[in-house]
Every structure is written in C-alpha cells, then in structure tokens.
Amino acid sequence: MTTNNPIYRMSHSSRFDALDNLIHKILKFMSNYDKSNIELYIRKTIQNNALLKTNLTHIYGIIVKYFKVLKLKRDENRQDFIVSKILSFMESFRPGMLSADMKVIDIGGGNGNVLSGMNDVLKGDKSNFVCVESKDWIEHYNYDNPNVTYVFWDNHTIEVLDDESCDLVLCMVSLHHMSDDTIANVLPEIYRVLKKGGILMIKEHDCNSIQTKNMILWEHHLYHLLDCAYDNRPFDYDTYYENSIYNFNSKMVWQAFMETYHFKYVLSKNRFLDGAYTANDSKNASNLYWDIYTK
C-alpha cells in the first residue's frame, strides 16, 4: 500500500514510524504478527473513518485473546515512574518545597494513584492530597487510595478548597477531556486555589497537525480498549463515542489559553520531565509534553 500521506511512510532514519512506536508501547505483550494486523486496521481506519466502529471491535477481539491466555493484570506500580519524575523535578525546580505540609491537587486525576504515590513519599495528611474528578467520564475508577481525598467536580467550584491554599496543582492529560465551557470554569478555580508563587504543572498533547491528531486519537482508543479488557467488560462503541470529549489543541494554543487566565508561563519539559520538549519525535507519537506555570 502506497500513499503520499506522510503518516503512512516508514521513516528512512528509523525502523519504526510514529504508529509503529505507539503500538509497540501500548501493546508490548503482543506478537509482532498481531501488532502488524492492528497496524493495518488502524491505517485503514485513518483512510476511512467509517470503519472505526468495526475495526475497534476487531482490535478489541485481538486484545481480549491475550488477556484470556496470559491472564494480564494492571500494573499497580506503573505510576511510580511518573511520581519519581514529578518529585525529582520539583526538588530541582523549587528546592525545599516538598514537605508533608504541602497541599497538592490533581485535576482529572483518575483514581488518584499519582497523588497517592507522592503522599507515600511525603507522608502528609490525606486532606492535603486532593483528587478532583468527574463521574461523567467513561473510564471506571475505584477511588480507593486511603491517603487521598476525592472531590467530584460540579462544573462550578471546588468548594472544599480555600482561596490560595494549594502549593501545587497537577493537570495531567485531562484538559483535552473537557469542553470549552468546563475549561472556562476549571481554570479560574485553579487560579483561585493556587497560592501566589504556587506551581501549576500541565501535561498535554501538542496537537499540531492532522497526523499528530490521528496518533493522539489512537493512543486514546487503544488505552480505552485495554481498560475494558482489564475490567473484563465488553467494548461498547456507542457509549464510548457518545461520552468521549477530545478537545485537542496545539502547545501554542494551550499556552495562550493559560495566559488568558493569568497563569505565568515558566518553562516546558519533555514527557519525562528530564529534558527539553521536542515536537514530532516518532518515539513520542502523541507529542506529550509538560508546561510549567506559576501564579
């Protein structure tokens, strides 16, 4: 199959292009044969989006086959890596800030595993580690970390948090799951609760092209199929499609948006928080990056 679209062309400088790297990262437990089949389904769907429902169902069938044979379980420690990266970055960026008394909130923090991992290190009171979530999102969480406080967003205010009470706010790949109206409510709330000089860390996708958008979408699709398999539940395409919000923007647009809400841009980092961000790296297929802001 040949095409002029650069998303389909194998890189001359690397064995794998962005899609290959994405599949190998997410579905590393699979044989190369099945990875190739999934790649073919994805490429055909990119060419013809009308195939999305059918091909997602086919891909889920392949994934489930492995779960039945290998008895795959979630990696309960997979967040440890990012926890260590956040703590290491904070220690170098703001020496002396990390302590049991600091207050951290995670907007769209899922089950709060990152907060829990941070609190395992800092040994603070659970009231200082607040996970703000919405029950409307399609992914399922147990909200069961004993050292984390859970708050559910009502699209108006985070009532349990006082003005200028938080040292650090995390917003990790969650803004793009919000509508513009929700973002317009969330960002002023973050600004309200953040202390002067406090830090806002945003992890997002730099959606700077159609090709990158396709990679970001398929990263989400594949992770959702994995979540279904881990939970031993069927893949319900209609529910998934109707309840998913994908509000992707480029890094430049996100930064301008944040500055509109009076956050001061400080610096950018790569997805591991240990170097500079480079756009359109095939090993970072969905252009993940961190932007650091302060108040």
Image (cartoon, rainbow, N blue to C red):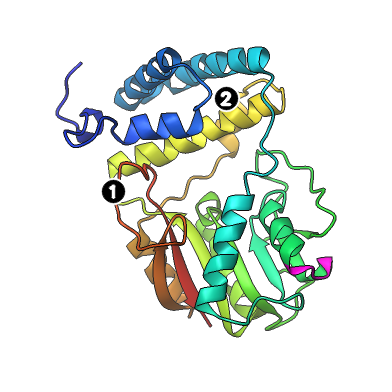
Q: Nearer the viewer, residue 175 or 71?
A: 71
The local crowd at label 2, few if under 14, some if 14 to 19, many if 20 or more residues have their Cα within 10 Å, is some
Residue on which the image places disc 1: 280
- Residue at the image position 37 percent from the left and 45 percent from the top: 284
The three-letter amino acid code for the residue at tag 1 is Asn
251 in relation to 234, above or below: below
Q: Are marks 1 and 2 in contact (CB under 8 Å)?
A: no
Callout 2: helix, strand or loop?
Answer: helix
Q: Give the mark nearest the N terminus, 1 or 2.
A: 2
Residues shaded magenta: 122-126
Q: Nearer the viewer, mark 1 or mark 2?
A: 1
Can residue 100 be spotted in the picture? yes
Residue 237: mark in rendering:
2
Q: Position of residue 34 (x, y in %)?
A: 45, 14
Can residue 182 be spotted in the picture? no
Q: Position of residue 1 (x, y in %)?
A: 20, 15
The three-letter amino acid code for the residue at tag 2 is Tyr
Q: Would you say residue 78 sits in the magenta stretch?
A: no
Could you say which quadrant of the image residue 216 lies in?
Answer: top left
Distance of mark 1 from mark 2, alpha carbons?
30 Å
136 in relation to 238, above or below: below
Could you say which quadrant of the image residue 107 lies in?
Answer: bottom right
Q: Position of residue 41 (x, y in %)?
A: 39, 18
Q: How many marks?
A: 2
